[in-house]
Amino acid sequence: MSATIIGIFLILGFSAYAATEENFMTDYTIVYDIDDTGVTTVSHKIVITNLKDDLIATNYSLDLKQLDVFDVSASDDKGKLEIFQKKAAGTANLSVSLRTFAVGTGKQNSVTILYKSKQIATKVGEVWNISIPRSQPTSETTKTNVTLSVPASFGQKIFISPIPATESKAGEKISYGFANEQIKNTNITAAFGKYQILNFRLKYQIENDNRYSSNTEIALPADVPGVQLVEYESLNPRPLKQYTDRDGNLMAVYKLKAKQKMDIELVGSAKITGKQIDPTKGGGFKDIPASVRNVYTRPLKYWEANSDDVTKVVASVINNNSTVTENAQNIYQYLVNNYSYEFNIAKKDYVDRKGAAAALFNKSEWGCMEFTDSFIAIARAAGIPAREINGYALTSIDAQRPLSVTFKSGDLLHAWPEFYDPKFGWVQVDPTWGDTSNTDYFTKLDTNHLVFVTKGIKSDYPLPAGAYRTASTEKLVDVSFSQTDNTPGFIMELETKKLTNLNIFQLLLGHSRFRIKNAGNVIVYDKNNAPILPGASKTIYISKKQNAVTFYNSFREEKIVSLNL
């Protein structure tokens, strides 16, 4: 008897199997070697071991779907093999005939297929993104090891998932090794560089229906500590005032006359970086500050933490002996394993928000709001502080990373949750994209998620950009990657002025009085993390012996301001 060993490379993953899999043991050693330009040389070494005396392997075939390749070759231990290529319907089939037949139990064939691709590693803005399709499902007759080799010139590691089993450096290359169980049913993703820069142009259409003047507020994209740094290039017209709310949102207040309509445009940029966490190193439930627990574990509309359907899930997934993050991961995995994103949702003009209790009971029409609301409700019921993020997540593959928050006549946005761990602080996760892409969006988030608003105090306010619309049908949300390296800006600019000190108590302490004005386009923070918004001022008292004061941005980069005493 003879058999063809067939390998199938899917857009969502690589799965290789034998026509009669139980008759062969197949070892796969796959190396992704990326050069400084992003071209990846891929080596598939396949060792096929017979498990039966009366069966031989005669051919090996590999299908590459939606992956452009070039410089294709094949070889065995005796030298070069002829390889046949066919293309049809977006699939390139690579097949080789084995030179020798391994007859008998334990006998082996070995073949290596090489090709190059420019699609595995891509540089967008200032970040190198790497996406390696998942390996074949682990079985008793298959074993896979994957090595990813990247140039040191790509910069620092932002994240790599799953966490590699090995990491080594040789010359100007860094290699990461992944073993069989690590890559079971999951893609390998990585990002290298410092941060991603996203440019945005947002329009807000507001109106006052009253017969008297009143104030209306809008939410502007704000800083997220350690993750997102926002610069405001222009905001027209200027607001009456600005403030940050308890969730950290930057709110701009406008005064409108009776029956007045107003169009507002915000132009700016955001630096986005990522962080990767180890769930086993998270904190315990007892270490969650009461001020955080009391606010962010309350049941609210859409987050029915006290409903029977929600508490049933809690009982099945929560382990009080595990860390907060390990339990949050259990919730994430429960949703990814048991619910599926409905791609038709994005085609609808508007979808009513169900809320967690209804969504968990009914598995149909799940979009990103259902994944987000359910995660938050279950987490809150379990005593894990959680809240919602609305924003824009850039994606080039809608089938893997969909957007599905729609507002009536509004733009298409995305929603994802975050939870609080006493060791890590607030951690953003994306169970929707985890479901659709077979990629880990729990231990890390990519650098493509731009936060517009955070909702925790309320489940339906504030509204994100794209939701402020009157009668116009024009596009309100425009977000794109910056294609320019070393983009200038994001500079902290502060002006100081010494003031007369009329405070008797401060005089007795020997303090001087200064006004610090934020003259730049980014929010700055004092040592107590209190923000000074662009254009705003803050009065400080300092010791007469002190000749400088330090401020920070949301990435905790320092700005030392000299004081003229």
Image (cartoon, rainbow, N blue to C red):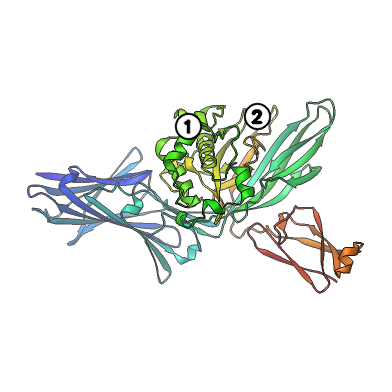
Q: Residue at x 28, y 54 (%)?
A: 144
Residue 351 placement: quadrant: top right
Say if 490 sits above or below 138 in the image: below
Q: Residue at x 73, y 48 (%)?
A: 234
Residue 354 placement: quadrant: top right
Q: Nearer the viewer, mark 1 or mark 2?
A: 1
Tell me if I can see residue 472 in this picture: yes
Using the numbered discs, state the Cα–Cα distance from disc 1 to disc 2 in whole angstroms.
39 Å
Tell me if I can see residue 366 in this picture: no
Of the image marks 1 and 2, the number of the one nearer the N terminus: 1
Say if 68 sits above or below 258 in the image: below
Q: Is residue 218 left or right of residue 104?
A: right
Q: Residues within 10 Å of mark 2 (few under 14, many from 20)?
A: few
Q: Which percent across, then down, holds residue 299?
A: 59, 36
Image quarter where the C terminus lies is bottom right
Q: Is residue 481 left or right of residue 468?
A: left
Q: Residues within 10 Å of mark 1 (few under 14, many from 20)?
A: some
For numbered disc 1, what is the local secondary structure? helix
Q: Which percent across, then down, holds residue 211?
A: 84, 25
Amino acid type of the residue tagged 2 in the rendering? Thr
Tell which of 411 and 289 is nearer to you.
289
Which residue position is annotated with label 2? 473
Say if 211 sits above or below 5 in the image: above
Which residue position is annotated with label 1? 309
Amino acid type of the residue tagged 1 in the rendering? Asp
Q: Which percent across, then down, holds residue 529?
A: 70, 57
User: Outermost residue, bottom direction?
Assistant: 545
Q: Is residue 252 left or right of residue 78?
A: right
